[in-house]
Image (cartoon, rainbow, N blue to C red):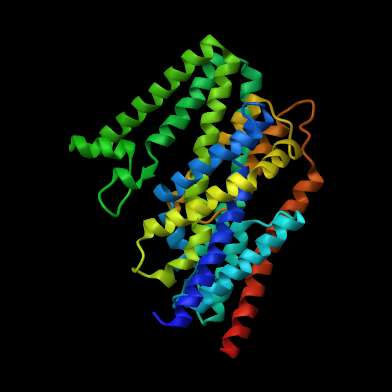
Amino acid sequence: MSGTALATLVVAALASLFMAWAIGAGSSGSTPFAPAVGANAITVMRAGFVVGILGLAGAVFQGANVSEAVGRELVVGVTLSPLAATTALIVAAVLVAVGVFAGYPIATAFTVTGAVVGTGLAMGGEPAWPKYREIATLWVLVPFVGGGIAYATARGLRSLDADEVTTPVLAAVVGAIVANIEFVFLGPTGTSRSLAAAVAAEVGRNEVAVQVAATVAFAAAVALVLRRDVMRDAERGQRHFLLALGGLVAFSAGGSQVGLAVGPLLPLVGGDVPLTYVLLGGGIGLLAGSWTGAPRMIKALSQDYSSLGPRRSIAALIPSFAIAQTAVFLGIPVSFNEIIVSGIVGSGFAASTGSGVSTRKMVFTVLAWVASLALALGVSYGAFTAVDALA
């Protein structure tokens, strides 16, 4: 490797590491446990510590799909050059830094996606319209699906008022999702497999039926455990369920958000560095951000968007977890701020006496997300064009 190429790789790696830190301090580090902190189920500092560990695990075990999509699937006809990848990372990192230090809600998913697309198009690549349609569809649906499910769940919990029944039923739904989450350590080398699929593969016959049966069995076991907990003490059982949901969302955040930091690096390292090592490096950056910067954001999210109790917090986290895992499975970069805020707002509006949700802040946040995408795309396109002309 030449000196210039090595210097470019080092600069890109530093920008990627900063991006990982910023994501850990912001979206992936602050959002998963914000409802739990708002419900007084866990302290701010402990939430920041736990989310860092779980985010690192999610990055290593589930980060491949989104990383590949960000690094190789956003532009057709070209592979990001070292200069293009470095430009995209620096532009995205600078914009995120401005957001972090100025207090503006710059969405990392929107920013990184815009930066990578901008540099790829500046290289002469063609838009990857099918992938853009997938991304746009998910981004548009998140507030309606996430907020709608959260609202319906919170209203159901409030109207039924039977925690010994409703909470275990919701736990069974979450258990069914967990049973079908794909992990790299459950599949053959280089592939992922879910717990239910692994059981079905072990049995070797009627795999679909066995997978369904394994899913039902796992969901029932989770529901039974939580029902016993709720029967002993309903409030404590809700807190335990809320913390478990926060952990699952934190794990999912690591699996999704690490791709935003390390995805642009993949064309640079090629096959020289195993993907697992790249994901581990990004996961360490997420962990550092969660431990050093997330507590302030956790406190802000838990208090500013809505005042939540345990029920509404549970209602906010369930769709957040499901949407996050959908994005990981499809390899779509997604904003965790968008996911979790949608859930918080939806569950907050379920309160008959008012939710404490600031409509003005919501509008400002949405406008900032759109501006993040457009600004990153335009700046990265112009920056690469200028740098390439001088090179």
Q: Is residue 348 left or right of residue 88?
A: right
Q: Percent position (x, y) of residue 26? A: 64, 50
Residue lying farthest to the front in this orientation: 3
Q: Residue at x 35, y 61 (%)?
A: 274
Q: Is residue 127 above or below residue 153?
A: below
* Residue 259 is at least partly visible in this image: yes
**Looking at the picture, does residue 234 appear above or below residue 307?**
above
Residue positioned 49% across, 23% down in the render: 169
Vertical placement of residue 360 versus 202, above or below: below
Q: Quadrant of the C terminus?
A: bottom right
Q: Quadrant of the N terminus?
A: bottom left
- Residue 70 percent coordinates (x, y): 49, 63
Residue 385, image x, y percentages: 60, 83
Task: Indicate the quadrant where residue 57 lies.
Answer: top left
Could you say which is closer to the camera, residue 133 or residue 36? 36
Q: Residue at x 31, y 30 (%)?
A: 214
Side of 94 relative to 77 (left or right) = right
Residue sitting nearer the eye, 119 or 17: 17
Q: Nearer the viewer, residue 105 or 272?
A: 272
Q: Residue furthest bottom?
A: 390
| Residue nearest the viewer, comparing 311 with 216 | 311
Report whether residue 339 is seen: no
